[in-house]
Image: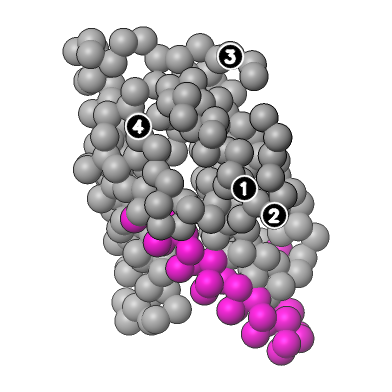
Amino acid sequence: MQQIPLSPDLTSSAWFADDRWSDLVGFIFFSALAVWTVAEVPTLSVWLLPTFAHELFSAIAFVIRDRARATAPSLTARATAYGGTLVIVAFVHVSRLWRPEWLSRTTSVEAATVGTILWLVGSLVVVVSIWWLRHAFSIEPEARRIVTSGPYRFARHPIYSGYALQYIGLSLNYPTAALALVMVAWVCFTLARIRFEERVLSQAFPEYIDYKQTVGALGPRLLPVQH
């Protein structure tokens, strides 16, 4: 496995200050998104509750999470993390404001129904997984603790599995070429993100390597992996 440079000794006061600063920024950002969700739709419907919970739980996680034991400080690692987090969200808001044709709704009732169901299921998977991960949650590739219970018994990255269901549902509702291109970008960001995250976790927690042998990245592993 390729080695990547990890963060310096986390007992240093300077690193602690940086860590707390990033927690504050993350809390403010996701709190603002939660408020924006309510402001956009004052009568918050049941359809938007998972989105609101996602943003609220993410904000809370930044406050209660453990301090990082290791991180991948490269610009590439950070860029893939933030790109994967924001590319779909940014596309949706840009489309709503300036290019509505990029989100032209399907005329197929069946596709819209299946897409909506996938969106809701994926949203619930994301919300549950974020809350289960809350003490180890981060946007950038960082190692805080290993979580192997709850949804993490079935997938090493159930949050990304939930996002995949959401975005497939979104694509069924809005089958445009522009959204398809952004989906390809999200897949590329996510695959790179998984690679960076697992390198950091494997180096900080050697037992994570055994966990990888028994649990698939995005779902249950069907075949055993030979060491």
Q: Earlier in the sequence, mark 1 or mark 4?
A: 4
**Residue situated in front as seen by the camera: 41 or 200:** 200
Q: Which mark is residue 216?
A: 1
Q: As drawn, which residue projects farthest toward the bottom?
A: 109
In depth, the one of 90 and 166 nearer the eye is 166
Badge 2, how many Cα within 10 Å: few under 14, some, many 20+?
few
> Which quarter of the picture shows residue 209?
top right
Q: Check disc 2 and report its element: helix, strand or loop.
A: loop
23 left or right of 185 in image? left
Give x and y (percent) for residue 99. 66, 61
Circle 2 is placed at which residue position? Answer: 222
Q: Where's the C terminus, which quadrant?
A: top right
Q: Does 18 sit above or below residue 194?
A: above
Which region of the structure is painted magenta?
Answer: 102-131
Asked if disc 2 and disc 3 are in contact, CB closer than 8 Å, the reply is no
Name the amino acid, label 2.
Answer: Leu
The residue mark sitting in front, 1 or 4, is 1
Q: Earlier in the sequence, mark 2 or mark 3?
A: 3
Q: Is 15 drawn above or below residue 52 in the view shown?
A: above
Marks 1 & 2, CB-CB < 8 Å contact: yes
Q: Which mark is residue 144?
A: 4
Residue beneath disc 3: 3
Type of the residue with mark 1: Gly
Q: Is residue 210 above or below residue 180?
A: above
Q: Secondary structure at mark 4?
A: loop
Q: Position of residue 207 (x, y in %)?
A: 46, 30
- Type of amino acid under label 3: Gln
Is residue 112 in the magenta section?
yes
Whole-angstrom CA distance, mark 1 to mark 3, is 22 Å
Marks 4/3: CA–CA distance: 18 Å
Percent x, y of residue 81? 53, 36
